[in-house]
Amino acid sequence: MAETRHTKVLIIGSGPAGYTAGIYASRAMLKPILVQGIEPGGQLTTTTEVENWPGHSEIQGPDLMVNMETHARATGTEIISDIITDLDLSKRPFSAIGDSGTIYTCDAVILATGARAKWLGLESEEAFKGFGVSACATCDGFFYRDQEIVVVGGGNTAVEEALFLTNFASKVTLVHRRDELRSERILADRLMKNPKIEPLWFHELAEVVGDDMPKGVTGVKVKHTKTGEITEIPCKGVFIAIGHAPANELVKDVLQTHMGGYVVTEPDSTATSIPGVFAAGDLTDHKYRQAVTSAGMGCMAALETERFLAENDE
Ligand code: FAD
Ligand code: NAP
């Protein structure tokens, strides 16, 4: 029979927002349960150096997230390896079903499910996912030692991925649809100075080209955004780094969303349209999408949860 667990506050997600909410909720004696999801530690576990987390001029993303998990655990957050597959917010106590079969009931919930990589939506991209097409350089870069690689995008992620991939690749071509990077200046400067990286401005990925036996990428066709001219670039790996979309599957039909699916919260607050449901981090933030802002929102969510429970349940 399925186990049922009740908690005052259920935190869904184990990125900076979730763990920070755990730390604050534990210190408020709320004994939170935090469900980690499919990516324990969240997006920062897919990167290397983090250089803008206050207090560390440089720390590896996975190490930072282990530190946060250890901190949350030490304050009393119960951290559970499970994935929430269904969430019922129609009445309190709210209930959530875990992939493990466990049913979690709670008086308040903090949604911190973050964001996931976006894909271009090309048929050929889908066909070669896992066979040369990836959205995670730290996960897959190692496979491309001395090979040529294409990175698509012009934001912080694309630039960081391109720089990181020069550790392995013989050449990295950065394909961007404009001639100006969206990334921070410091990263753009590093990219422009790196002799292994060649930016290809005003181009979009038109098709991933490859073989079936053995299955793998052999190149890409790119299209000039102004002239429409198609060029083929030989490569073994294609890294798509065109941004992230909020992981809103659990709530997109019951909570208001905007700007491409981000959960709407009240101004200067993490409160959503349902009393007792709070949202923090990249799930709700279309603007900043940083670890430190996510952690800040996790803090706000826990403090607002504490106030909500004090006013409604005690
Ligand atoms: P996320 O980190 O996205 O975590 C979401 C969590 O929710 C995950 O643990 C996931 O398992 C969980 N989850 C999702 N669905 C479910 C479910 N159904 N059930 C249970 N759990 C679920 N920011 C910086 O400030 N500095 C950087 O240097 C930096 N580098 C980056 C490099 C890369 C490659 C990327 C992709 C992002 C980077 N960012 C950086 C952005 C930063 O990672 C995010 O802003 C931050 O991680 C968002 O935190 P979050 O807690 O909202 O969610
Ligand atoms: P992003 O900032 O949204 O940038 C996405 C890039 O992909 C843009 O250059 C965009 O082009 C391009 N793009 C989007 N859709 C495209 C399409 N269909 N075809 C071709 N190109 C497309 O996303 P991100 O770089 O993943 O960053 C997400 C968030 O995480 C940001 O807030 C970022 O600051 C944060 N982050 C921070 C760090 C850091 O602090 N070091 C590192 C990584 C990520 P246009 O420029 O033309 O729109």
Image (cartoon, helix red, strand yellow):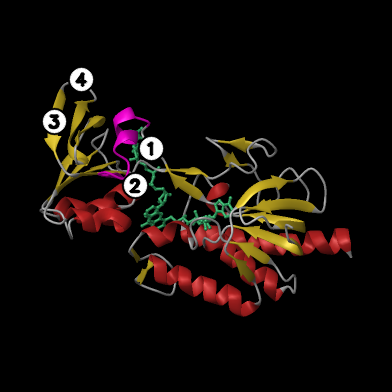
Q: Is residue 43 above or below residue 25?
A: above
For disc 1, does the CB lie below 8 Å from ligand 2? no
Task: Give the residue type that dot 4 points to.
Answer: Gly
Q: How many marks?
A: 4
Q: Which residues are magenta?
A: 121-134
Task: Give the residue type that dot 2 points to.
Answer: Ala
Task: Give the residue type that dot 1 points to.
Answer: Trp
Evaluate if marks 2 and 3 touch, with contact meaning CB atoms under 8 Å apart.
no
- In-image side of 16 versus 252 (left or right): left
Discs 4/2, front: 2
Residue, disc 3: 232
Task: Say if residue 191 shows up in the picture.
Answer: yes
- In-image side of 135 versus 275 (left or right): left
The answer for how far apart the CA atoms under marks 4 and 2 are is: 26 Å
Whole-percent x and y of residue 165?
21, 55
- In-image side of 141 versus 264 (left or right): left
Residue, disc 2: 135
Tag 3's secondary structure? Answer: strand
The answer for how far apart the CA atoms under marks 3 and 1 are is: 20 Å
Residue, disc 4: 228
Whole-percent x and y of residue 142?
23, 58
Q: Is residue 8 above or below residue 247?
A: below
Evaluate if marks 2 and 1 touch, with contact meaning CB atoms under 8 Å apart.
yes
Which image quarter is the N terminus in?
bottom right
Which of 27 and 136 lies nearest the eye of the viewer?
136
Evaluate if marks 4 and 3 touch, with contact meaning CB atoms under 8 Å apart.
no
